[in-house]
Each structure stands twice: as structure tokens, then as C-alpha cells.
Amino acid sequence: MRSIRLPGKLAHTLSVVLTFLLTLTLLLTCLTWQMHRVATDSALHEGVATDSRILALQMERIQARVEELAQEHHFHKETAMQFITTDALADYNREVTAWWMGMMGEEPEMEAPEWDVSEIEAAVREDALFQENTPANMRRSTARDLVAYEIGLAARKAVLPVRSDILAIIMPKVLEKVEVPTLMNYLALAPQLCGGASIALALLLLLVMIRRVSKAALYIGAGMGAAALCIAGVGCVVYLLDIPGMIAEISTLLAAQVSLLTKQVALQAGLFAAVCLVVGLALIGLHQLDMRRLCRRRKVAA
Amino acid sequence: MARKHPRVKPANWLLPLLFALPVLAGAAAALLLWGDKIRELFSIAVKLAVIS
């Protein structure tokens, strides 16, 4: 009977190196995929910004400011609040999201969009309580500068709790030094390249272990399982750094958005890791089954 | 040369852990060595950019 030669020591050593590389490329595939999502997926950010919990928090903040202004300048808070609906707030959130995401594109707009307060201004001027308590010659300027402008500012701070003036100073300088759209194109390519490299490494493992394919399954499975564990490890590190907690010390509104975004990213990365783990363990299981079958065959032959 | 008798090694199930260990150890070391620094830098950036 002609004996089949098994993979030698060199093949196994090479396979260990390839498996470790496979682990790294799979981990990088997941990380760059999520980075690309965070940097370019406007649907993801719109979903976060228009989430009912976020809108409720923003609405609460704006309402508190309107109440303060209503007490200070004597008008019915409902006069202004009738224009600040959840739908209008969601639209403004979409507008702001499109604006800051456009910063990473070509010819970005530096000025953040503003909430249109002209209707609020007109309504406050017509408010009976306001007319009773404000001299006629002061109504226009008070309604415009001290009420409507302040409400617009409160809406902008609630929706975009970052210093947009600093962004407007820093971004042109960054854009001068770095080709952001080109970087974004590289970032879009990175998950595809890493994914392609993972497939190539898996095929190489198959080629190295061609004399016993089940060994290739063992190594590919181990690499996939290891990548899943590494993704979980990176997730733990991010969790321990507690980024939303750090932001919450300064802005609860932004922290709520970042927390929701982190959850969305973690969910997809977790799914990727789960698929890797299940497929990896299935491949290891296939190898174990094959070895068991081989053992039985040898015993029968003996 | 006689061929080795095939064996089913239960330890094969632990191979993913073995390959993940260097990366996990690296991540843990980075967190221990630079965790505070990363948090500090991030905190400064947040304080500069975020409106309270």
C-alpha cells in the first residue's frame, strides 16, 4: 500500500506563522471596517442623532432654556415651544450631521447650520404677555436678540455640543496639511484589503497543508477563533477606557450620543467576532472529527 | 520510518486562545502602560472641544 506523506515540521511552522498573520488581518479587517463606518456612514450618525432618547434629552435642554427666557422676558413659553417639535429637531439633527460629515469631504462648509428662528421671533413679538411687559420700541430687538437668537443658540448647543468655532479654526489648517478625502478613500479600501489578505492567507494555509486538508481547517479555525478573542479584547480595552464616561463629565448630551454610537459599533464588531468564533470552532471540530475517524480506521486495521 | 499513530488532541480546542494571547497581552500591556496617558490626552481634547 502506498503511504501518504503527512505535512512535515516546516509546513507546520509555516502554518503557525500564517495563522498568526490571519488572526492579525482578521482583527484589522474588523477594526478598519468599523473605523470606516464611523468616519463615513451618515446613516449611522443620523440614526444616532435622531434616536428618540437623544431627541428627548435635547428637547428637555431646549425647553429648560425657553422656560428661563420666558420668565426673564415675559412671554408664554408655548409661543416659542410650538415651533420646537420633535420632527423639527430631528430635521435639524440631520442637517447638522450632514454638515460635520461634509467636513471630511472636498470643499467643506465651515459654518455650522443654524436653526431658523424667524418664526419664533415673529410669534414672540405677537405674544400678549410679551406685548404687555415690553415697551413697543424694544419689542423687535428683544424678541430677535434676547429671545429668538438665544433659543437658536440653545438648539445648536443641544444638537452640536462641540465648539464649532474651534472646528472652524482648526479644520482649514488640518485640510491644508492632510488630504482628508484621499485618507478617506484609503480608509474605505483598508477593510477590503485586510479581508482580501485574510482570504489569501487562508488559501495559503490550505496549500501548505494540502497533504491533510483537515489540518488546514484546524489552523484556519484557530486563526478565526483567535481573531474573535482579539476583537473581544479590543472591546474590553475600549470599555475600560470609558470614553462616554469621560465625555459625560463635561456634556451629558454628547456622552449619550457617543454611548449610543459605541453600542452600534460594538454590536456589529460583536457580530463579526461571533461569526468568526462559530466558523472557527466548526473548522476545529471538523479536524477533530477527521482525527477521530482516522483513529477508528487505524484500530480496525490493527 | 514508522508513521506516528494518530491521536485526537482535546487541547486543539484551545488553539484560538494560544494565537490570541500575544495580541491580548499586547493590548493589556498598552492599557497598563499608556492607559492613563491616553485618558489624560483624550480628556484634554474633550475639554477643549466640548461645550459643557
Image (cartoon, rainbow, N blue to C red):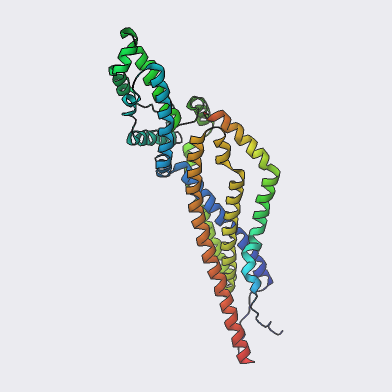
Direction from residue A78 to residue A15 in the image, left or right: right
Compared to residue A262, the image places residue A150 above or below, namely above
Residue pictured at 60% horizontal, 56% vertical? A230
Q: Position of residue A114 (x, y in %)?
A: 38, 26
* Quarter of the rendering containing residue A143: top left
Residue closer to the observer: A59 or A134: A134
Direction from residue A258 to residue A13 in the image, left or right: right
Compared to residue A12, the image places residue A133 above or below, namely above
Direction from residue A182 to residue B44 in the image, left or right: right
Compared to residue B2, the image places residue A203 above or below, namely above
Q: Position of residue A146 (x, y in %)?
A: 40, 16
Residue closer to the observer: A152 or A165: A152
Residue closer to the observer: A63 or A7: A63
Residue pictured at 51% horizontal, 43% vertical? A259
Q: Is residue A94 visible?
A: yes
Residue pictured at 61% horizontal, 48% vertical? A237
Task: Report the number of discs.
Answer: 0
Compared to residue A1, the image places residue A172 above or below, namely above
* Quarter of the rendering containing residue B7: bottom right
On the rendered image, what quadrant is the N terminus of chain B found in?
bottom right
Q: Is residue A211 visible?
A: no
* Quarter of the rendering containing residue A205: bottom right
Direction from residue A30 to residue A79 in the image, left or right: left
Q: Position of residue A257 (x, y in %)?
A: 47, 40
Q: Position of residue A154 (x, y in %)?
A: 43, 26
Residue closer to the observer: A272 or A117: A117
Residue pictured at 27% horizontal, 18% vertical? A126
